[in-house]
Image (cartoon, helix red, strand yellow):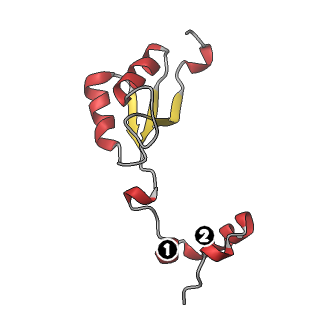
Amino acid sequence: MDDPILKGAIDIHAHFGPDSYGRQWDAFEIAKLMQARGMRGAVFKNHWSESAGLAWLIRKYAAPGFEAFGGLALNTSVGGINPPRSATSPRWKAATRRSCGCRRMIRRTR
């Protein structure tokens, strides 16, 4: 596959296997495929763990010269996020109420 739009591109949301959903390739295979197509790099994400260590291994062993970055999904399985206790809680509440109407999900904290 030779698509000029891929040359130098960075994928900012690349999921790899194994994961909570079936994935066709592992992170090493994805990095090698992307590099072979001329891509510059990718941010690797997983629903069950952080991927910074894996990104380091990709850079060192799987695809030297490829810019691999780790991502952290804020799913409940990896700790999630606790909006009522976070510093951005007031802004999150306001944005959430306006955008999705999820008032039952948001408790008032005072």
Q: Secondary structure at mark 1?
A: loop
Task: Residue 95: give x, y in percent of width and height.
Answer: 67, 68
Give the residue displayed 46% in from the left and 56% down from the top.
74
Marks 2 and 1: which is nearer the front?
A: 2
- Mark 2 sits on what residue? 92
Residue shown at 47% from the left, 24% from the top: 40
Residue 42: image location, x then y, percent: 46, 32
Q: Residue at x 43, y 47 (%)?
A: 47
Residue 30, compared with residue 22, is above or below; it is above
Q: Mark 1 Cα within 10 Å, few/some/many (few <14, many 20+)?
A: few
Q: Residue at x 47, y 77 (%)?
A: 85
**What is the quadrant of the N terminus in the image?**
top right
Mark 2 burial class by Cα count in 10 Å: few <14, some 14-19, many 20+: some
Up the image or down, 55 lies above or below 33; here it is below
49 or 12, which lies in front?
Answer: 49
107 left or right of 85 in image: right
Residue reaching furthest to the top: 2
User: x and y percent of residue 9 in the render?
Assistant: 54, 26
2 or 1: tag closer to the N-terminus: 1
- Report how far apart the C-alphas of labels 2 and 1 lie in the structure: 9 Å
| Quadrant, the C terminus | bottom right
Position of 2 with respect to 14 (left or right) is right
Type of the residue with mark 1: Ala
